[in-house]
Amino acid sequence: MSKKAFIFPGQGSQYIGMAKDLYDNSVEAIEMIKIADDALGVNLSYIMFNGPEEQLKQTEFTQPAIFLHSVVLSSLIRTLQPDAAAGHSLGEYSALVSANAIQFYDAVKLVRARGKAMQQAGIENPGTLAAIVGLEPEKVEEFCKEASSEGIVQCANFNSPGQIVISGSLTGVRKAMELCKTGGAKIVKELVVSGAFHSPLMKSAKDILLKELNDTPFYNARFPVYANVTAKPVTQKDEIKKILYEQVTSPVRWEETIKNMIADGFDEFYEIGPGKVLQGLAKRINPDVKIFGIDKYEDVEKYL
């Protein structure tokens, strides 16, 4: 019997008009979106549906927008039940809601607090990210170590074979980029971001998030959620809280996560949320994997 996993996207998958067709076609979606707007005291749905893009791209709005879109989708799917879930960075929160480890109302406030704290950390400790394509992880880690004499830099995302994102201070990342270029990387590209996510420069965001996590009720997950920090399944509420705290400054081990899920017998993956980023990564990690996307209302209709 096939084992199904839900996977949830992270920052960068947002687009203007996201979740609008869900709102137009589902009473449940309307309710959830209104609850989120009320919980945040912000007209998030207006920003999602209409933009402007500059506002939607601000971390404090991007994160709850992607989270809301993803969680509404997973709530509408009736006939498709996962045996486990995972989420890329922010997507881990969507995965935990799908597993009933956090209640939707609490999680949407937590995600906004996380987004605001990370945006603020990016202002206080400016940094950047860069994509490195075509080098082994060990090589990229070696170059980061060498470049750290110039400034903070470390691997932030191990996304798929030969696709790694590094994060840190401008001087540290740019030195590591130089080393990766001369070391044979096919592509080395600085990314337009508001902070050095998944690096020590997010320490102040981590401290703020700790208080929010301690104030939020957590529950044991009803199915395993594979954690970014360890690439392993978790179900216990105390462990879940700990990994969300650690996740802010730790690398996202996405390639390892998907490989571990496949090794554990998962053979059908469903990306739940805006965009197709995780579908692309899954195909690069294992070309034989069955992967589907659920983003629009027409995708949901198959599983009502």
Image (spheres, helix red, strand yellow):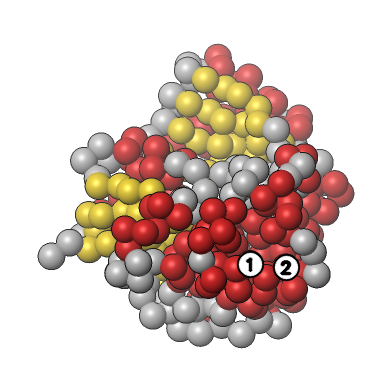
Q: How many marks?
A: 2
Identity of the amino acid at label 1?
A: Ile
Q: Where residue 102 appears, x then y in whole percent?
A: 55, 78
Please state if 126 lies on the left or on the right of 8 as rendered: right
In this view, 68 is above or below 98? above
In the orientation shown, which residue stands out farthest toward the right? 124
Q: Please name whichever residue, 124 or 180, is drawn nearer the observer in this view of the structure.
A: 124
Residue under the image location 76 percent in, 69 percent down: 40
Q: Where residue 125 appears, x then y in whole percent?
A: 82, 46
How far apart, in angstroms, are the residues tagged by discs 1 and 2? 6 Å
The answer to whether one can see residue 35 in this image is yes
Q: Where residue 259 appears, x then y in whole percent?
A: 31, 50
Identity of the amino acid at label 2?
A: Asp
Residue under the image location 55 percent in, 67 percent down: 29
User: Mark 1 near mark 2, Cβ–Cβ under 8 Å?
Assistant: yes
Q: The C terminus appears in which quarter of the rendering? A: bottom left
The answer to whether one can see residue 115 in this image is no
Residue under the image location 69 percent in, 58 percent down: 45
Q: Dot 2 lies on which element?
A: helix
Q: Quadrant of residue 53?
A: top right
Q: Please name whichever residue, 166 or 159, is drawn nearer the observer in this view of the structure.
A: 159
The residue beneath circle 2 is: 37
In this view, 240 is above or below 290? below
Please state if 38 lies on the left or on the right of 90 as rendered: right
In this view, 42 is above or below 216? above
- Disc ID at residue 61: none
The residue beneath circle 1 is: 33
Q: Please name whichever residue, 149 or 154, is drawn nearer the observer in this view of the structure.
A: 154
In this view, 27 is above or below 251? below
- Binning the other alpha carbons within 10 Å of mark 1 as few (below 14), some (14 to 19) or many (20 upward) gives many
Residue under the image location 39 percent in, 58 percent down: 300
Q: Where residue 1 appears, x then y in whole percent?
A: 13, 65
